[in-house]
Image (cartoon, coloured by chain):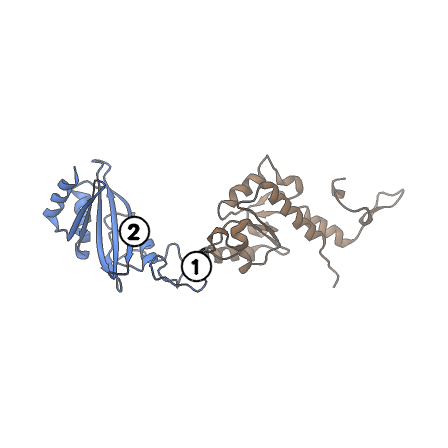
Chain colours: A brown, B blue
Amino acid sequence: MGLMNGIDEKFLKKIPGAPVIMTSIEWIINASRANSLWTVTFGLRCCAIEMMHTGATKTDWARFGFEVPAASPRRADVMVVAGTVSKKMVPIVKRLYEQMPDPKYVIAMGACAISGGPFVYDSYSVVYGVDKIIPVDVYIPGCPPRPEALIDGFIKLQKKIMTQKFRK
Amino acid sequence: MNYQEILEKIKTKVEPIYYKEDLGVLNAEVKPSDIKKVISFLKDELKFDWLNFITAIDWPENQNIEIIYYLYSNITKDKVVIRVKLDRNNPTIDTITDIFKTAEWHERETAEMFGVKFLNHPYPKRLLTIDGMDAPLRKDFKCDDLKPLPKD
């Protein structure tokens, strides 16, 4: 059962003699969200090349449930900020983030998106980290991170989604 | 053409304030009011049909902003550099967009990076920087969140 990959036995219970699986609504919703993450199709700088490579055949990220890059931010669940955010780009990144439907997640990929990276000093045009403008869930260090690191970040995001609680 | 021939031909039209030869390329400084005349002369009569770039240099000690026009000819394979010195406190010069269309973006970039005002520019909006920013390539540029590089 593909659905049960990596899921603890205590969450799923098969009733003997009947084709019924008992689990919580919370787990079902979280698993549906975590295993069908669509990314916004956009890249800012050189990390985007590595992100494209991650989605291509050699390290195909659809194996882990990240599926396709969405053609519009209105269909996307996760935004990979792959590259330097310049001050001129801030309104556009914000608008993309605001167009995404809830629940939405952000991954800051690479040193530039985390803190400004090599452009920290003597720079008049770079935002020092994308978390200054939008909330970030997972940070992936590297310049640029390897595809394995990006997939690792995605899996960490999936684990984070699986821990979401709906009860107050 | 070597640089002396180009210089002689330019001298028939406008008188350069100062000129020098640098790596075989003529650098001629002209008056700001002559810039359209000399650029259109170079384009129409000396066949300099390619504007490589426009940029500027900030000289705070002389209170000057120097605009640089680098022209190339695809026909005679010659190069020429035209320089114009402007007042640093109020740098204003005519646009050459009506002669070279490609000058539009070069002038927009020079305008925002050095605070130069190009008169009669067709679309004088900012190209790369955000609104309200000072000219960042001037030597005395200050910015609120600029972190200077620590000296060892």
- Is B19 above or below relative to A167? above
Answer with left or right where residue B54 lies relative to residue A80: left
Mark 1 Cα-neighbour bin, 10 Å: few <14, some 14–19, many ≥20: few
How many tags in the picture?
Answer: 2
Q: Residue furthest right?
A: A17
Q: Secondary structure at mark 2?
A: strand
In the rendered image, which residue does mark 2 sit on? B55
Where does residue A54 sit, x and y in percent of width and height?
58, 40
Image coords of residue B89 (percent x, y):
27, 64
Q: Position of residue B4 (x, y in %)?
A: 14, 41
Name the kind of residue labelled 2 in the image. Thr
Label 2 chain ID? B
**Amino acid of disc 1:** Pro
Residue at the front extreme, as displayed: B152
Q: What residue appears at the point 29 percent right and 51 percent down from the top-left corner? A: B55
Give the alpha-carbon distance from disc 2 to disc 1, as whole Å. Answer: 25 Å
Check disc 1 and report the residue beneath it.
B148
Pick the front one: B25 or A158: B25
B60, above or below B46, in the image: below
Q: Quadrant of the N terminus of chain B?
A: top left
* Residue at figure coordinates x 72%, y 49% from the top left: A31
